[in-house]
Image: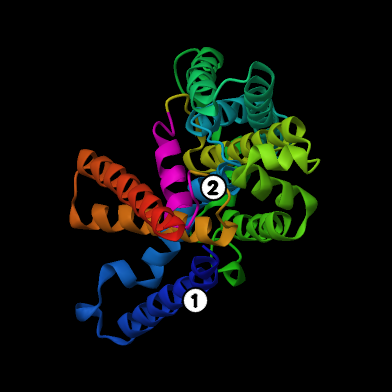
Amino acid sequence: MIGGRRLAPVAWSLVALAWVAAIGVNHLLPPELQNPFFTFANQRTIVTQTVIVGLCTLGMTLVIVSGGIDLSVGSTVALASVVAALALRAGLGAAAAVAAGVAAGTAVGLANGLLVTRLRVIPFIVTLGTLGIARGAAKWLGDQEPVRVAPELARGFSKLMQKTPEAGWLLVAPGVWMLLLLAAVMAIVLRRTVLGAWTVALGSSEATARLCGVPVARTRVVLYALCGLFAGLAGAMQLSRLTVGDPTTAAGLELDVIAAVVIGGGSLAGGEGSVVGSLAGAFLMAALKNLCNLLGVQNHSQEMLVGAIIVAAVALDHWRHARAAA
C-alpha cells in the first residue's frame, strides 16, 4: 500500500503531462485536423463541468477515507440549489444565497453524522434514507417545480460558473479557481492536521483508533458535516450554472462522486485516499462524459459506463488489498 501511495503522484503527473502535451500538439495542427476534444475551448468546458462533482469529492474523500460513505450528496446538492434560489429570489444577494445553500448542505451532513454515531446504523442505510428526505424536502420547498430567479438577480450570480469569464486573465470560471483553492486546503487538512490523522486512523481500524484516544463519534460527525458543507456549496454552484433551483437536479450524482474518489485511489474499505487523486478522478469523469457527448453516446449508455467504472475500480482495489495481504 505504501508503494501505491508513492507511485500515485507520479502516475497522475504523467497523465497530466500527457494531457497537456496532447492539447499543445492539437493546437499546433491546422484547424481542419484538430480534434475538437483537445481544443482549448473544450478543455475550459470540461474543467467548468468538473466543479460540481469536484466540490462534492472534497467532502466524500474524507468520509470514504474514514471508512464511511454518503449516498445523499446528490439530493443535498438539489436541496441546496433550491434553498439558494429561494434566498436569491428573496433579494438577499449572492453571498447570502451561497451561505444559505451551504447551511442547508451542512445541516444534512450534520444529520447524517449524528444518525450514524448515535443510532449506530451503518452509513449506507442512513445516507440512503437521508437521500430520500433531502430530495423530498427540495421538492417541497420548490413546490414540485424549479425555483426560477429573475434575470437581473441571477446575472451576477451566474458569473461564478461562466465558462468564459469576463476577466480574461482568469482563463477559466471563478468557480474553478475556488475549487482548486479549497482542494489545496483540504489536502493540507487530510495530510497535515490532527483531523486528517484521525480520519485515516478511523478508516484503518476504528477499534484501534478508539484505543488510541481518537474521539470517534465527534470526528465522524465533523466529517459528515464537512461532506454536507461541500455538497451545499456545490448546490449553490449548480444554481449559478443553471440559474434555477431544480429539485430534480443531480440525480445519481453520488455515483459520479464515489467513482471519482475510487478512481483517484480512495478505498471503500477505508484508510486510503487523497484529495488530489479524487480531484483528478472528477476531472477524468467530466472528460469522459464530454467525450461521450462529442461522440453522440446516449445518456443511458453513459450511466452504464459509470457503473462499470465503479465496479472495475472497486474490484481492482480489492485485488490490490488481497495481494498486499498475501
Give how far apart the Cα atoms at labels 1 and 2 are: 21 Å
Where residue 192 appears, x then y in whole percent? 75, 60
Identify the residue at horizontal 55%, vertical 16% (top origin). Answer: 137
Mark 1: which amino acid? Answer: Val
Give the quadrant of residue 321.
bottom left
Q: How many marks?
A: 2
How would you rate the neighbour count of disc 1 (Cα within 10 Å): few for under 14, some for 14-19, many for 20 or more? Answer: few
Relative to 3, say whether 108 is above or below. Answer: above
- Determine whether 242 is above or below 39 in the image: above
- Say what secondary structure mark 2 lies in: helix
Q: Is residue 262 magenta?
A: yes
For image coordinates 63% across by 57% down, the residue present is: 183
Q: Nearer the viewer, residue 149 or 6?
A: 6
Can residue 166 be seen? yes
Comparing 21 with 215, the one in front is 215
Q: Is residue 195 left or right of residue 305?
A: right
Residue 149 visible in the current orientation:
no
Is 168 one of the magenta-colored residues? Answer: no
Foreground label between 1 and 2: 1
Q: Which label belongs to residue 57? A: 2
User: How packed is label 2: few (under 14 Cα within 10 Å), some, or many (20 or more)?
Assistant: many
Name the spot of residue 325 as percent of width and height, x first: 45, 56
Question: In the image, which residues are magenta?
Answer: 249-268
Question: Which dot marks residue 10?
Answer: 1
